[in-house]
Image (cartoon, rainbow, N blue to C red):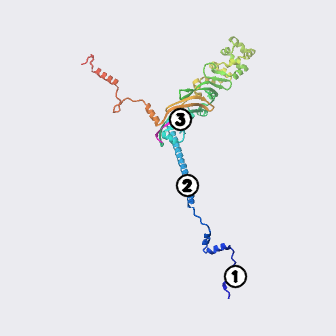
Amino acid sequence: MRNPYEDLAALADPEEDYGDSSHRRLEDDVLGLGLRADDEQADEEWTRPDHRRGRRRRGRFAALPIALKAVVAVVVAMAFLVVADRWAVLYAEQKTQEKLKDSLHLATEPDVTVHGFPFLTQIADKRLDKVDIAIPDVAADRVSLARVEASASDVQLQGSLPTDIKGAVIGRMQGSVLLSFDDLNRELGSSQVKFTEMGRSSVRAEGSLPVAGHDLRMKAEAHIRRVGGRGIATDISGMQLNIADIAVYRPGKGEGEGLRLTRKGAEEVRRNLAQAKALLSIPSLAERLGVPDSAIDRTVRSEEELHRVTGAPRFVKQVMKLNLVDVLVEHPWLLKKIGIDPGLASGLTQLTKPDLSNRFSLSFQLPKVPGYVRLQNISVEREGIRADLSGMDMPLGDAEKKDAEKKAPEKGPAKKGGKPEPSGKNDKGQKDKGEKSQKPEGGKEH
């Protein structure tokens, strides 16, 4: 009789051939845990494990993060120190700006830059190596200084540093001030004068001036000079007002001053016989033109003689030398004849040198600041007037107050009640007066 299980086994799929060892491992590892038979393990050669190598590997790996952490810690600490140092710089700059604004009575705070690193070591020493200061638009008399730039050194700080800076004393200071032509033209625009560079120490001033209903072009030269150690002023010369292009007026009574014809105006008189006759008909002017009194009538009546006189090479120069102000009162018609309004000429004579000089003058005075401050090396540049600035021992803030207290006049001794004691001289005077009142009229004492 056949076994029924054999029939079922014949119906199953054929098994794969894994080889002897694989088949054996599969049979041995019934649980599927990858375990090997004892005989396979016995066939392999046993080696002693090296525990020190694993320990050494773990030590090197552990040492790397510690070194990295140390570097990071140092970098972070340095970053914090730099941030703290820069914060202290910003704080000191802000406090210095406030002190300068109060001490110099400025409208806006100046720009202050503190140099040197590290800053905290300077704070600990209460002394700054270098501080740059820039002050825009400083009021200086009639005008404003476009910019004041200075570099201060050896600055001694006062107060509980670094959080409470109460004052400072600037040891030395060097800088410059600029009086800009643009600011001058804007601030003095009411006088309709424009200033430009003319030379290293001179300024050209040009503008217009209304006189008797006429807008006259005026110009002058301003020579820059220093006033004391803190101011700048100008000496005005070459002032003149042009009447169109035929005449020019220079205030004063000296040579070349007064109302005179230009070359173009004199050439017009030479060509215009009517104007020439008008000039030669006045004896005082004819004499200056080289025509004697005996020949005036003949010259005026004879056209040929008039051509001879006006055609002389020296005639134009002689006409340009005539001061027409001399004939304004008695012969105003003459001015009208040659194209000059008599009313305008009369108005010009009312303008004096001081009046015109004031219109062209440039001047400024440095604001009062504590300490020793002086202007030096004044020069004229394309953008304006520049002067070097130097100073020393300049107190600011509380240091300025203490300096003012030292310079205050000392008062005389006072009693406890606050009233000053009378001097011995007054006591003596009062005593003498009392003694005299006790004497009889006869002069003998009883």
Residue type at mark 3: give it.
Answer: Ala
* The quadrant where residue 25 appears: bottom right
Q: Secondary structure at mark 2?
A: helix
Q: Marks 2 and 1, Cα distance to the nearest angstrom? A: 67 Å
Q: Please say if the residues under marks 3 and 2 sit with CB atoms less than 8 Å apart.
A: no
Q: Taken as a whole, is the magenta stretch helix, strand or loop?
A: strand
Question: Circle 2 sits on which residue?
Answer: 63
Instruction: Identify the residue position indicated by label 1 in the image.
Output: 10
Q: Is residue 238 above or below residue 49?
A: above
**Residue type indicated by callout 1:** Ala
Give the mark, 3 or 2, whose residue is nearer the N terminus: 2
Mark whose residue sits in front, 3 or 2: 2
- Using the rendered image of the protein, determine whether residue 301 is visible from the camera's viewpoint: yes
Magenta-tinted stretch: 151-161
* Residue 218 horizontal/vertical position (percent): 63, 27
* Numbered tag placed on residue 152 in the rendering: 3
Q: Position of residue 122 (x, y in %)?
A: 50, 40
